[in-house]
Image (cartoon, rainbow, N blue to C red):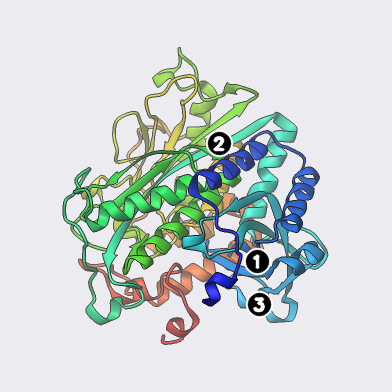
Amino acid sequence: MSSNEQRNFLALPYEELEELNLKAKRQRRDRVATDTIREERLKYLTDEKRIKAVTVLFSDLEGRLHMLDYDKKFLIKSWDNLTFDGSSIRGFTAQRESDLRLFLDWGSFYWVPEDFFGGGKVVVFADVIDKGGAPYAADVRGVLKGFADDKFAKDGYTLNAANEIEGFLFQGVDAEQHFFQKQRFDYVNTGGYYHSLPGDPLRTFIDTAAEVQRALGFENEKDHPEVAPSQFEINYSYGDAVGAADQIQLYKLICRQVATRMGLTASFLPKPVVGVNGSGMHTNVSISKGKKNLMWDPKGQEKLSAFGWGFVDKILTHGNDLCLLLNASVNAYRRLDPHFEAPNQLKASAVDRGSMIRVPIGNEKSMRVEVRSVSPDANPYLVLYSIFKTGLDGTTSKIANLRQAERYLPDNIYSALADFRNATWTTKLLGEDVKARYADLKQAAADRCPRLLGTFVKVPEVQYHHDVYNQYLWNFF
């Protein structure tokens, strides 16, 4: 008998996984009490003998996803005191104050496919807290969660988001890490928009990733090849702000896992190849109160309510302040190129896809605002926090014709850094300490890359990209 046959690890069919994850999603939407969910999950872990480990996920200040496995029996006994060394995480604590703790968000618990996550495992997201038990300021997931909870408690607002995340599929495993060898990425498909034959690598990748997403309760809507060669997009339904940001992290993780299993690389660099469209992460947001969509007004301009237009005006006012949060890498500024449908104009429009904000056609249920100038490598928690916080609590400029004025987003990271550092609003968003940490991380990456982007992708903008980061590569500088 082989060693595998001696094991009895949890491996559920995809249909059963989907049912479990949709039930968990309904609990989050219905705001079932945290204590109730925690006790339910702990009982499940205790009773389900086929689970060996719990994978805990958290994100650093730049949005890089970190994962660690806890033995199930240990976690059941010690779930309220999971410590880790924060000084090893870029943007977190200094060595002298390194102890941090993970606070499990039991509502963000996922049953995962055995073939891509390993047998006998479940996944749960965590917030980071300091040794005194307070939310850790550089853990933006916790900041977003606190903000969303506060808006619900004070105003009855539910913050909703849906993200359209584009990426590229390239030949070879770890193509980004090996970019310096050939200084190019190789396509797996050159079919273009909506065109991919059944069974070719891009279609097989999209189909497989969509199946895994469906099993995790994403509630898929549509998927297809995008405009550029080897580019893809897999759309799914909206969720609450924290759940939506978690799903972005899972989406990228799933795509990378599926691609690696195929001997390929899923890349979320905003502009890995010049001369073709880059990848964006169009962020659709709405706010509801009870069952009412506050963005909807059948008599409003473009059927967007005065509340919605006020939200748009605040985003436009602070657009340059936020640019570094929404476009977080050197490479992201290649995407803000007007020749490739780039949303680099600080204006709002129902039809112009060059606008930072678009007001899509909607109805009472679907009316929303689409922020288009977001890159897929940005920290999703920072993206949603900065958009919602700015749209609700920001100021409105007295610029004449604000929604159609001739204003543009920065075309390089240095200008974006200057806008970010000089803005009073970003200090209000993040606090002085976290703002300075974030700016210093971005400055360090910028300083390792040529100041002028030029006409081809340079090795440093890939090698020192925060998604690609590892200590070994970083120390080559």
Residue lying at 66% horizontally and 41% vertically, measured from the top left: 148
* Numbered badge on residue 87: 3
Label 3 Cα crowd, 10 Å radius (few <14 / some 14-19 / many 20+): some
Disc 2, SS: strand
Amino acid type, callout 1: Ala
Q: Residue 430: x percent and y percent?
A: 63, 55
- Label 3 or label 1, whichever lies nearer to me, is 1
Q: Can residue 121 be seen in this view?
A: yes
> What residue would you read off at disc 2?
160
Disc 3, SS: helix
Disc 1, SS: strand
Residue 391 vertical position relative to residue 45 in the rendered view, above or below:
above
> What residue would you read off at disc 1?
53
Amino acid type, callout 3: Ser
177 left or right, relative to 36: left
In whole angstroms, how far apart are the C-alphas of marks 3 and 1?
Answer: 25 Å
Amino acid type, callout 2: Asn
